[in-house]
Amino acid sequence: MNDPLLLWLPWRAAATPHRLALVAPDGSRLTYAELLARADEMALALLALGVRAGDRVGVFLPNGVAFASVVHACMRLGAVLLPLNVRLTPGELAWQVSDAGARVVVCATSTESRLGEARARLPDLVLVHADEPTHSRTSWNTASAAGAPLRDRTDAHEPLAIVYTSGTTGAPKGAVLTYSNFWWSAVGSALNLGVHDDDRWLAPLPLFHVGGLSVLTRSAIYGTTAVLHDGFDAARVNAAIDDERITLVSLVPTMLHRLLEARGERPAPESLRCVLLGGGPAPRTLLERCAALCIPVSQTYGLTEGCSQVATLSPRDALRKLGSAGRPLYSSELRVVDADGRDPSPGMGGEILIRGPIVTPGYWKRPDATARAIVDGWLHTGDFGTLDEDGYLYVLDRRDDLIVTGGENVYPAEVEGVLSAHPRVAEAAVIGESDAEWGQRVVAIVRLVDGEAADRALAEELRAHCRASLAAYKVPREVRITEAPLPRTASGKVRRGVLRGARAEPVSHFERPLNG
């Protein structure tokens, strides 16, 4: 091995075997010794099915013990983990499984039917069950692999997982993430937030998303406890924070908004050290409300290709730099460059570039995409942001979502943040649509709080609300009111591409002349 690295779970099970490793959605608890036993049993079963080092193993499961066991089993074999989004259509699943060339997919009885198209495309694909909550092993046969040696170390630069991007701006690409990527991501987070022996990191995010997967890997590295939920439920997360001594929780802005709605005016307990907020910029009003309730929010900036977090605001800067995603974590470098590739003055916008050992070595079977994205060691993220005079990052939006109207740049996230602060708005998305005179027009798609009725007066009220905080060219020219929840990725990001590609079926829409 060129750069040997001890595997985290075997080392942790030897060092602290009786420490609590995992709390599952059904309430079951596993120590590190017990989690290793589960992982090794699954590793032997995969070995009996013919899985070898370098083979891709799909996992199509809800959050739980079985998912965590597959993650660590792949490490014990040197197989490459392929986390599959449980929200994908059968066609999307078939494409990803085929593109990755997976040999085996571990599924549940409840998810197997959606893998039929993948099995039709790949006749040699093996589907096996690992059902929650009983973790039935009737499909597994470990006898033929009993006694086989399992790895306790790896080369740091070997691939641990292939995680497909969410596809908000095009077809998904498989980002290859190495052991080194996950290790340095964990180190950077630890040096920013610290590690306490009693840390309990709650993950309501799906484990097939890099943010959820990172909670599993970091907890194993730190020797702390990962608490898994099988989806986001505001009441359940609030109860965990209040009654189960949760110290860290990873959320996206939509989740945090719902959490506060359910929480009312109750301040957070002192045991909650940090709410890590990813998935896009958060409205300033949301962050201010958290501060009033003593909820310590650290906004983060990350992406799949950066193995989750790249920059994170430290808790001590939460109020001083409200709205910032912080400075780069240890080992990461970050730049903002203008259209000519130059570093602009502080406060001026440009594309965010990152470099360091957290960055993917490339996309699976996509050397062309890799060469476009990684230039001279810098990953071009496609995101827009600014750096202030102290080097703190403020994320504006995706480059592909930028609206150019009359020669002026409009960042949808900024307008969405203003709209979301209106008391009658449950959620909002802003897109650009073609306009013969102005190039693009700013269009808002809004879902109201329950029971609210839409009318032209409301549309004008929302525009007036925007005019109080935004330049005139940023104010939506059209407001569409819809009853349907906005389409989102599993990580909570609004799929603006879906909204642009097919005009939503609105309850009503209200338009203002472009010169109005």
Image (tube, rainbow, N blue to C red):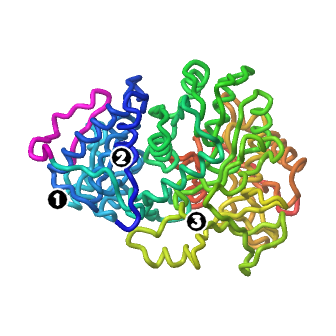
Magenta region, residue range? 127-147
Residue 489 placement, left or right of 102? right
**Residue at point 43% right, 63% down?**
176
**Residue 58 location in percent, x, y?**
31, 52
Q: Which one is closest to the eye, mark 3 or mark 1?
A: 3
The residue under label 3 is: 356
Residue 499 placement, left or right of 130? right
Pick whichever of labels 3 and 2 is earlier in the sequence. 2
| Label 2 environment density (alpha carbons within 10 Å; few <14, some 14–19, many ≥20) | many
Pick whichever of labels 2 and 1 is earlier in the sequence. 2
Residue 31: which quarter of the image?
A: top left
| Label 3 environment density (alpha carbons within 10 Å; few <14, some 14–19, many ≥20) | some
Quick check: can you spot residue 66?
yes
**Residue 170 location in percent, x, y?**
51, 65
Looking at the rendered structure, which numbered label has been put on residue 71? 2
* Up/down of 404 relative to 199, above or below: below
Q: Quadrant of the N terminus?
A: bottom left
The residue under label 1 is: 124
- Dot 2 and dot 1 residues touching (CB under 8 Å): no
| Magenta stretch, main secondary structure class | loop
Q: Front-most of 315 and 91?
A: 315
| Label 1 environment density (alpha carbons within 10 Å; few <14, some 14–19, many ≥20) | few
**Residue at point 69% right, 69% down?**
351
Residue 259 placement, left or right of 283? left
Pick whichever of labels 3 and 1 is earlier in the sequence. 1
* Up/down of 413 relative to 441, above or below: above
